[in-house]
Amino acid sequence: MALSEQFLKDLAAPCNYHDYEKVFEALKPRFKKVLDAISTERNNIFSANDVSIYLQGSYKNDVYVSENTKLEIVFELKKIKTGDLQNVSKIVKNRELKVEFEYSLKDFKEDLYYKFLDEFSSQDVLKTNRAIEIHKNRYNPLTVDILPAYHFIKRDEETRKELPALIIYESITNKYVLSFPKLHSLYLDEKDKQTNGNFKQMIRSVRRFSNYLIVNDILPVGFAPGYFVDCLLSNVPDNLFKGDLNEMWLKMLNFLKYTNLTTFMCVHKQFEMFNNTYDGWTVEEASYFIDTLSSAYFNIKQ
């Protein structure tokens, strides 16, 4: 017996746990203070106006499903005195870059980290591989992930169209990689419009059900993160997102189980989903996830 329609509706419902835009606006003056301090200490190598600060991720895309979801904020440095941020020496493999600047992205991330230690309680600030995490506390209801990034435009090899991208730095691997959050949001929105809002409903539904399976020890902790679910479902044809939620689940599972996953692309359409050394996802893991979803869909009694 499949999951009930009401259970699926509950899984697919949009969230309203926090006024995340209000949280974001309240933080902006503190962010500007940090940027002004770095600029002064770095002899005005950039100004606060050279950094675009904006939301990305699950809140921005209306696919978050937990009150513990982090608020993702990009600090996009657009220009510096000592060099053109567009001047990347070489792109290798999928996303890894070789970049040389007098003021590196590694420097920018370190500067932000130490200024955040001064601006916020030091025990609430943590440097992660790609971001700087500011933990929620009594003054801040959401944990915030700050992503330091350089502005970059990638030119499409076929159309020559300019594509908005970011260069980001990984502390653990000591690598620079490309990211496309604006394209990710754009294509999520486009597919959602083309499916009359059913696409994002299904993303929330699958994300919540995945969390349910993790809590109940059916999937491993950390398996199939939200970005993975976004990419997987973005490859499901638009015409299958029709009908009630049970109909869409059945069509989605049938498509995923019997389709060649090696052809799948990431949401932003710049890299193959399973030939991407950066994310490290495999067809085998995806197949296991799909099979587990299918089995649970037909056998779990809620």
Image (tube, rainbow, N blue to C red):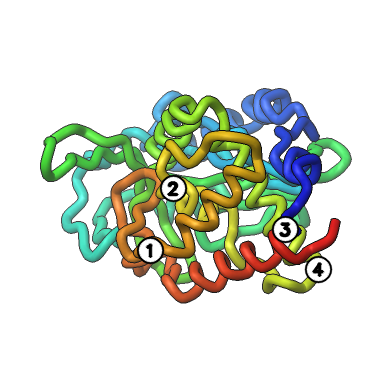
Total number of numbered discs in the rendering: 4
Specify which label sits upstream in the sequence, 3 or 4: 3
Residue occupied by mark 1: 261
Specify which label sits upstream in the sequence, 2 or 3: 3
Residue occupied by mark 3: 211
Q: CA distance from mark 1 to mark 4?
A: 27 Å
The answer to whether residue 47 is seen in the rendering is no
Specify which label sits upstream in the sequence, 1 or 3: 3
Dot label at residue 49: none
Dot 1: few (<14), some (14–19), or many (≥20) neighbours within 10 Å?
some
Q: CA distance from mark 2 to mark 1?
A: 11 Å
**Which mark's residue is nearer the viewer, 1 or 3?**
1
Counting from the top left corner in percent of width and height, residue 245 is at 65, 40
Dot label at residue 216: 4
Q: CA distance from mark 2 to mark 4?
A: 27 Å
The residue tagged with tag 1: helix, strand or loop? helix
Q: CA distance from mark 1 to mark 3?
A: 23 Å
Question: Residue flagged by tag 4: what amino acid is it?
Answer: Asn
The residue tagged with tag 2: helix, strand or loop? loop
Seen at 22% across and 39% down, the residue is 84
The answer to whether 106 is drawn above or below residue 196 in the figure is below
Dot label at residue 236: 2
Question: Residue flagged by tag 2: what amino acid is it?
Answer: Val
Seen at 72% across and 23% down, the residue is 22
**Which mark's residue is nearer the viewer, 2 or 3?**
2
The answer to whether 8 is drawn above or below residue 173 in the figure is above
Counting from the top left corner in percent of width and height, residue 275 is at 32, 67
**Which mark's residue is nearer the viewer, 1 or 4?**
1
Q: Is residue 160 left or right of residue 169?
A: left
Question: Residue flagged by tag 3: what amino acid is it?
Answer: Asn
Residue closer to the observer: 41 or 70: 70
